[in-house]
Image: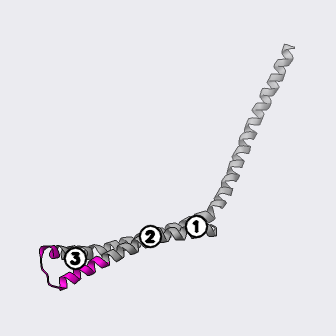
Amino acid sequence: MNIKEQDTSKNQWLSQIIIPFAGCFLLIIFSSYTIINKGLNLEFNLRMMGDISSSFLILLILPSMIFTLALIILLIFLINKIIKQIKIVFPKLQSISNRINNGINSICEMSVRPLFFFESFQTILRRNKKD
């Protein structure tokens, strides 16, 4: 992985994971703050009660969202480490595969060589009979 690919990877990490997560987190904090702030002013109406109930639902769902996000981040790191290990091991496996392939090709060529010899010998004998 060269420097240019690393910079692109870091930019993707920032633009596709960190910024959306931070934006959603700030939006939830701002919404919770405004709802709680209105609740402290004691303006009880139906809309405010709906806002309070939605804030409680957010508070109930938030731990599971954080756990899920942590799990996703952990899986991303694990997959990244696995990919790095595969990149290290893959050339070794490829060389082993190439040796096996070359061995099978040589076995096939050696097994067919007597048949070619026999066919060519038969053709020579047929030509001699015709002449």
Q: Nearer the viewer, residue 102 or 10?
A: 10
**Which residue occupies 71% across, 48% down?**
103
Residue furthest left in the image? 45
Horizontal side, residue 71 vs residue 4: left or right: left
Corner quadrant of residue 61: bottom left
Q: Which residue is mark 3?
A: 56
Q: Can residue 49 be seen from the camera position used here?
A: yes
Circle 1: residue type: Lys
Secondary structure of the magenta portion, mostly?
A: helix
- Which residues are drawn in magenta? 29-49
Q: Is residue 108 above or below residue 14?
A: above
Q: CA distance from mark 3 to mark 2?
A: 26 Å
Q: Secondary structure at mark 3?
A: helix
Q: Report the amino acid beneath label 2.
A: Ile
Looking at the rendered structure, the kind of residue marked 3 is Phe
Image quarter in which the N terminus is found: bottom right
Q: Which residue is mark 2?
A: 17
Circle 1 is placed at which residue position? 84
CA separation in Å, label 1 and label 2: 21 Å
State the residue in front, 58 or 99: 58
- Does the magenta-highlighted stretch encompass residue 55? no
